[in-house]
Image (cartoon, rainbow, N blue to C red):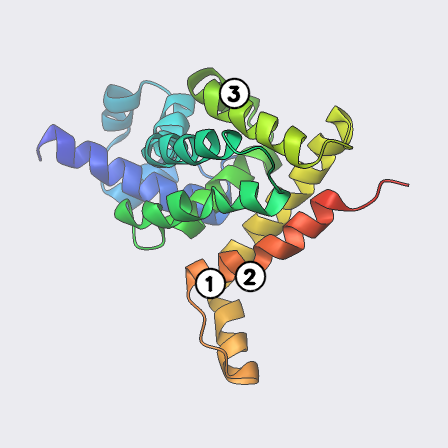
Amino acid sequence: MPRKETKRKILDAAEVLFAEQGFSDTSLRLITSAADVNLASVNYHFGSRKDLIKAVMDRYLALFMPAVNEALVRLLEQPRLSVEQVFECFVAPLMGLTRVRRRGPEIFLQLLGGGYMDNQGFLRWFIINHYGEVVDNFTRCMQRAAPGLSSAELFWRLHFTLGTVVFTMASSEALRDIARNDFNEDIDVEGLVRKVIPYLASGMEARTD
């Protein structure tokens, strides 16, 4: 099997297992079994389990982060901006992840949430180290959109925001089925994302007293 094909099979298997079971509960043995490769192939292509996790994430981040950054930079040029506008910067880049996999948006957010839930500190370091400009621009936008929030309060609200988005996307198929059967509302994944944005914005802007 060509080396590129072997590497792709490992990444494909690893990202699905990581998204479904979490990073901590997914062993290399599970990955090699799903990819139908041996452990030596994983070591050859990625070197370590941590490097495999970073490679899985960067498959999406390398496409997602530059597109988000472009939107944030354009937003920073405006004299006034809202929290909802900041969150809107993520919609098109997120939908663009279907170029990686059909369910790319859902899988990416599950992986991102898993990085926090499984306490993968090195993953947060990787994102900040490689995409620090994006993080900085997002923080600047959010501080301008919600100037009354302290750094600590901003941290907590963004943490709750991520949790809401991850849960929503992880259960997107079930939610869309409910919407269709109970409310006669046909909604796609992008529509689901746009539906949750006003809710998230209201939470970010809620009074602190």
Query: Is the residue 112 above or below the residue 181 in the image?
Result: above
In the drawing, does residue 114 fall left or right of residue 92? right
Q: Earlier in the sequence, mark 3 or mark 1?
A: 3
- Mark 2–mark 1 CB contact (< 8 Å): yes
Choose top left, top right, bottom left or bottom right for residue 152. top right
Residue 104: where, in percent of width, then height?
A: 36, 49
Reading the image, the residue beneath label 1 is 191
Q: Residue at x 26, y 42 (%)?
A: 35
Q: Earlier in the sequence, mark 3 or mark 2?
A: 3
Neighbour tally class for label 2: few under 14, some 14-19, many 20 plus, Cα within 10 Å: few
Give the structural element (helix, strand or loop) at label 3: helix
Q: Residue at x 40, y 26 (%)?
A: 54
Neighbour tally class for label 1: few under 14, some 14-19, many 20 plus, Cα within 10 Å: few
Query: Is the residue 39 above or below the residue 15 in the image?
Result: above
Q: Residue furthest front?
A: 79
Residue 175: where, in percent of width, then height?
A: 53, 68
Of residue 57 and residue 184, the one placed in the foreground of this image is 184
Q: The residue under label 2 is which amino acid type?
A: Lys
In the drawing, does residue 57 fall left or right of residue 150? left
Q: Is residue 64 visible?
A: yes
Residue 34: where, in percent of width, then height?
A: 30, 45
- Mark 3–mark 1 CB contact (< 8 Å): no
The residues bearing labels 2 and 1 have C-alpha atoms spaced at a distance of 6 Å
Q: The residue under label 3 is which amino acid type?
A: Phe
Residue 142: where, in percent of width, then height?
A: 63, 33
Q: Which mark is residue 195?
A: 2
Reading the image, the residue beneath label 3 is 122
Choose top left, top right, bottom left or bottom right for residue 138. top right
The mark tally for this picture is 3
- Mark 3–mark 2 CB contact (< 8 Å): no
Quarter of the rendering occupied by the C terminus: top right
Give the structural element (helix, strand or loop) at label 2: helix
